């Protein structure tokens, strides 16, 4: 059994997961983020106790734990160098959590955890080279090569949201540059362009929504597109165009078997996937076809904790003395 904690700035999603990736139980509690890292780590032990008690499982039958954190992590040392939402800077989370829980612990970035989950039990099942993208407020991504998350220099691998897709006339991104994928194809980008169309008077449906609610989300744009609103459809197609362009170029680096797409904007389904695949196919080389590669994520919010079980399992195996114990 593995204990998994997806630690976010507002909540900790926890799960107890077996060797086959089945979730035996899960819970979510508010992160005591104001009280500092030690207190949040202490929370993990409380959650473990409660989960085990609810399921009638002895805490001693848990063999390892995986922790997902939204930030940068030094994999070798298990130190979280920077997690802005948690206010953690250079916190030795692996060491602290292993002490408190009394079992081996591994820590990874939350986007990589989700990617591991989709690879193990989700849309990438049976594959070991996958790239997972979450189209939300920004674009989070995890790159898995040969079954392992790619961390890169300073933990900067997989920052696909900042892949430049518009060299000229791009919008300013949160990273300070312009024309990043995140400013074109994230859920918030789709909401932004939907607002622009509503304000220009090109989309009657979105104009009504904007007047009623004061803002447009990617869900509103999808809804309008489904009802035949041409401007809304164009907004999604434009986001898909840049996404497919980025994926085709990223494909040239390590040729993943799957690009697994999740997050709010992916809820548009075929409205997003079809034009993304056409764009990918247009920009990719050597006759690579997008329909075999670009697929929707299937685990939703559970991807993270399932991936953390895989991580805990890997941690355990690599600490075994050269395979003798298995
Ligand atoms: Zn950027």
Image (cartoon, rainbow, N blue to C red):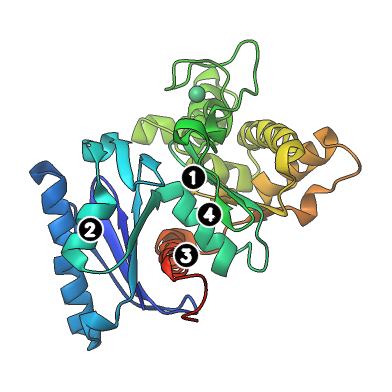
Give me the residue at 36% from left, 79% from top.
Answer: 1
Q: Do the CB atoms of the residues marked 3 and 2 lie less than 8 Å apart?
A: no
In space, the residues marked 3 and 1 are separated at their CA atoms by 43 Å
In space, the residues marked 3 and 2 are separated at their CA atoms by 18 Å
Left or right of residue 24: residue 135? right
Q: Earlier in the sequence, mark 3 or mark 1?
A: 1
State the image coordinates of residue 80 (x, y, percent, origin top left): 31, 41
**Residue for badge 4:** 115
The label number, if any, that marks residue 318 in the structure image: 3
Left or right of residue 224: residue 35? left
Q: Is residue 142 visible?
A: yes
Q: Earlier in the sequence, mark 4 or mark 2?
A: 2
Front of the two marks 4 and 2 = 2
Front of the two marks 2 and 1 = 2
Give me the residue at 63% from left, 37% from top.
Answer: 236
Q: Do the CB atoms of the residues marked 4 and 3 lie less than 8 Å apart?
A: no
Front of the two marks 4 and 1 = 4
**Residue for badge 2:** 97
Give me the residue at 38% from left, 41% from top.
Answer: 74
Left or right of residue 167: residue 280? right
**Callout 4: few (<14), some (14-19), or many (20+) C-alpha neighbours within 10 Å?**
many
**Callout 2: few (<14), some (14-19), or many (20+) C-alpha neighbours within 10 Å?**
many
**Residue for badge 1:** 219
Q: Earlier in the sequence, mark 4 or mark 1?
A: 4
State the image coordinates of residue 226 (x, y, percent, origin top left): 62, 48
């Amino acid at each position: 059994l593995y204990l998994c904690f997806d630690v976010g700035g507002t909540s900790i999603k926890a799960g107890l997961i077996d060797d086959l990736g089945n979730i035996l139980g899960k819970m979510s509690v508010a992160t005591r983020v104001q009280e500092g890292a030690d207190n949040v780590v202490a929370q993990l032990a409380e959650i473990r106790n409660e989960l085990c008690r609810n399921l009638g499982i002895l805490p001693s039958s848990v063999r390892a734990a995986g922790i997902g954190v939204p930030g940068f992590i030094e994999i070798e040392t298990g130190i979280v160098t920077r997690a802005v939402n948690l206010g953690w800077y250079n916190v030795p989370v692996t060491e602290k959590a292993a002490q408190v829980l009394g079992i081996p612990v591994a820590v990874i970035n939350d986007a990589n955890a989700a990617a591991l989950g989709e690879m193990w039990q989700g849309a990438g099942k049976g594959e070991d080279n996958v790239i997972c993208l979450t189209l939300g407020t920004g674009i989070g991504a995890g790159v898995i090569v040969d079954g392992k998350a790619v961390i890169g220099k300073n933990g900067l691998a997989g920052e696909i949201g900042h892949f430049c897709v518009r060299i000229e006339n791009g919008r300013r991104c949160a990273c300070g540059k312009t024309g990043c994928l995140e400013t074109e194809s994230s859920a918030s980008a789709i909401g932004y362009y939907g607002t622009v169309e509503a304000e220009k008077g090109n989309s009657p449906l979105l104009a009504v929504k904007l007047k009623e609610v004061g803002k447009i989300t990617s869900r509103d744009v999808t809804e309008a597109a489904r009802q035949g609103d041409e401007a809304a459809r164009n907004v999604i197609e434009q986001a898909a165009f840049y996404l497919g362009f980025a994926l085709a170029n990223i494909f040239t680096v390590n040729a993943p078997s799957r690009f697994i797409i999740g997050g709010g904007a992916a809820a548009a389904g075929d409205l997003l996937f079809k034009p993304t695949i056409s764009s990918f196919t247009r920009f990719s080389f050597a006759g690579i076809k997008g329909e075999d590669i670009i697929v929707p994520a299937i685990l939703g919010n559970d991807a993270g904790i399932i991936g953390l079980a895989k991580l805990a399992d890997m941690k355990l195996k690599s600490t075994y003395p050269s395979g003798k114990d298995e």
